[in-house]
Image (cartoon, rainbow, N blue to C red):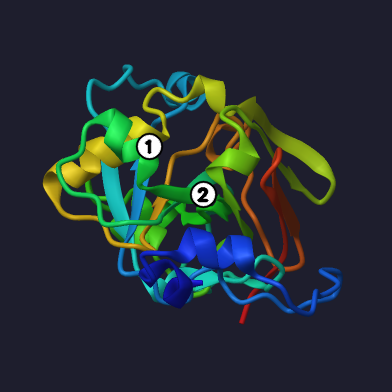
Amino acid sequence: MGDLLKDPGWRQVAADADGRRHDTHGLDYASLTPQPPKIICVGLNYRTHILESGSPIPKHPTLFAKFAPALVGAFDDIELSVAASQWDWEAELGLVIGSVAHRLDETEAASAIAGYTVVNDITARDWQMRTREWLQGKTFARTTPIGPHLVTVDEAGTTHGIRCSVNGELMQKADTGDLVFGPAALVSYISTILPLQPGDVIATGTPGGVGLSQTPPRFLSDGDEVITWIEGVGECRNTCRTP
């Protein structure tokens, strides 16, 4: 996928593709883009999550990063390092960049989005809260499912239901209409800071219902199954394992 998106004519290549089709059931998917140039994440971007966290509605997007070793495929195990104990789920709509984006307005930014995918920003809350900066709790190796597909914007539509269940219990249910900063606004904002490249991933934030906000707080453990679903985009289904 990363190599395809580097081709300026990738949309036509995809449209002209004609070859053997694969039964998607039972395939072992790699992460959608195994080595994305950048993985930029957005915090506190759904009103429901902002309210449950007790934070004010932000005036600007809250940004942090992940690195490629954090990614796993849509059906791979999530590795819960024994170094952390408060593992939490965060269902998110992922954006994948399809062309160079630098200092774009929102209309231009919308055209730079190749499409959408499913992400779960599995977070070590005890590490996230150690300092004011979140990165160390967000980029543990092999914790972030992404995929299985890239669904182009014209196929996916604009508003999507989003859900996350743990062991069959629905924990998060919302739709992307609750986003404070939508996809085009995020790409425009981030592209003002630095150029975005084809294959870059933006995780757009999670809705309410995370484990930290449960009473009492609830966290993931070995053997838990996490299903992350986004309407019109796809589903990740992952089992948590303590290595």
Q: Residue at x 36, y 34 (%)?
A: 184
Q: Is residue 2 visible?
A: yes
Residue 58 appears at what percent x and percent y?
A: 28, 22
For label 1, the SS is helix
Drawn side of residue 169 relative to residue 154, left or right:
right
Between 42 and 232, the one lying in front of the other is 232
Quadrant in the picture for residue 100: bottom left
Residue 34 appears at what percent x and percent y?
A: 48, 76
Between 234 and 170, the one lying in front of the other is 234
Drawn side of residue 217 relative to residue 128, left or right:
right
Considering only order in the chain, which callout, 2 or 1, is on the residue closer to the N terminus?
1
Quarter in which the C terminus is drawn = bottom right
For label 2, the SS is strand
**Amino acid found under the numbered disc labelled 1:** Ala
**Amino acid found under the numbered disc labelled 2:** Gly
Instruction: Tell me how many marks there are.
Output: 2
Q: Residue at x 20, y 45 (%)?
A: 191
> Which of the labelled discs sits on residue 110, or is there none?
1
Between 158 and 76, the one lying in front of the other is 158
Q: Residue at x 52, y 21 (%)?
A: 178
Between 59 and 95, the one lying in front of the other is 95
Please, is residue 71 above or below residue 45 in the view? below
> Which of the labelled discs sits on residue 115, or is there none?
2
Q: Residue at x 81, y 75 (%)?
A: 22
Packing grade of label 1 (10 A; few <14, some 14-19, many >=20) is: many
Drawn side of residue 189 relative to residue 6, left or right:
left
Residue 82 appears at what percent x and percent y?
A: 53, 74
> Which of the labelled discs sits on residue 151, or is there none?
none
Packing grade of label 2 (10 A; few <14, some 14-19, many >=20) is: many
Q: Real-space Cα distance between discs 1 and 2?
A: 10 Å
